[in-house]
Structure formats: C-alpha cells, structure tokens
C-alpha cells in the first residue's frame, strides 16, 4: 500500500492544509460575491442592536456581508475586528466598507443558508 507523502514530510502536510483553507476561502468569496449587505453599521458605531441582528443573520445565513460606514480606515478596521470577536465569526474578506463574515451553524436551515444553496 503506498504511503502518503504527508506522513513522511510534515511540511507537506502543512502545505496541504493551507491549500485546503485557500480553496475554501475562494469558495466562500465566490458565494458572497452575489450577496448584498445584511447589516449596516452607521455613524453611531457598534450598538447592541447591531450585534443582535448580526448574530441572528449569522445563525440563519452562516455567510453574510456587513457594511461599515464609520470614520477612517483604522476606525473601520477596529469595528470589523470587534464584530468578528463579539459574534465568534471568521473574517472571510474585507473590501472597502464591506466585510464578509462566516460562522457555521449546526441548525442551519437549508432554505436560508447561503452555504447550502447552489450558486
């Protein structure tokens, strides 16, 4: 029986996992391309209502876009970082004022989930 290269060279195993991660990120970006922002953070900044709505959207849709219209680049990056940590999501992509967040849900409804729909 042939031996996998990853079992011989640990560096190859790390590269294989990184390739898998990059492939998944590309898929998530492709799915998110056609989505519109579900949550918008405005001039008041990050409020509890926005966090609640984002948690609901991540539970229902798993992959969502968030539009952040606050201050300069540093303030925008800080708000996005707070959103990611407070909701337990992963940052898939950030372009301009729009961030794409991902949080897998165990009870995802296939009719609402952006990951379970064909694109």
Image (cartoon, rainbow, N blue to C red):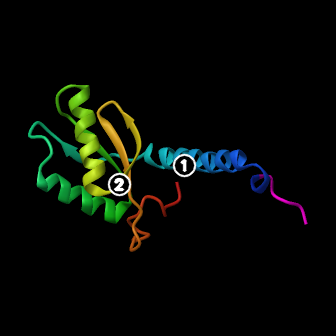
Name the chief secondary structure element in magenta: loop
Q: Is residue 113 left or right of 21 when viewed as pictured?
A: left
Q: Residue at the spot x=21%, y=25% of the render?
A: 72
Q: Is residue 9 above or below residue 107?
A: above
Mark 2 or mark 1, which has the lower sequence index? 1
Is residue 38 visible to the viewer in this orientation of the structure?
Answer: no
Indicate which label's residue lies in the foreground, 2 or 1. Answer: 2
Q: Which residues are magenta?
A: 1-5
Is residue 89 visible to the viewer in this orientation of the structure?
Answer: yes
* Residue receiving disc 2: 89
Secondary structure beneath disc 2? loop
93 and 31: which is toward the camera: 93
Q: Is residue 63 above or below residue 99?
A: below
x%, y% of residue 78? 24, 37
Secondary structure beneath disc 1? helix
Q: Which mark is residue 6?
A: none
Q: Residue at the spot x=36%, y=61% of the render?
A: 61
x%, y% of residue 116? 49, 64
* Residue receiving disc 1: 27
Q: Residue at the spot x=18%, y=59% of the render?
A: 52
x%, y% of residue 7? 76, 57
x%, y% of residue 71? 17, 28
Q: Residue at the spot x=39%, y=67% of the render?
A: 105
Looking at the rendering, in which quadrant would you find the N terminus? bottom right
Graded by Cα atoms within 10 Å as few (under 14), some (14 to 19) or many (20 or more), the crowding at tag 1 reads few
61 and 80: which is toward the camera: 80
The verdict on residue 45 being magenta is: no
In this view, the residue farthest toward the top is: 72
**Pointers 2 and 1 in contact (CB under 8 A)?**
no
């Amino acid at each position: 029986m042939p031996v996998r290269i990853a079992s011989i060279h640990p560096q190859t195993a790390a590269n294989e996992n990184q390739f898998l991660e990059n492939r998944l990120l590309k898929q998530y970006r492709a799915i998110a391309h056609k989505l519109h922002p579900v949550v918008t953070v405005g001039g008041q900044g990050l409020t509890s209502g926005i966090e609640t709505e984002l948690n609901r959207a991540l539970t229902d849709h798993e992959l969502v876009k968030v539009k952040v219209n606050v201050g300069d680049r540093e303030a925008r990056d800080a708000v996005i970082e707070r959103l990611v940590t407070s909701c337990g999501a992963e940052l898939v992509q950030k372009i301009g004022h729009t961030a794409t967040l991902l949080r897998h849900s165990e009870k995802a409804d296939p009719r609402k989930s952006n990951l379970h729909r064909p694109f």
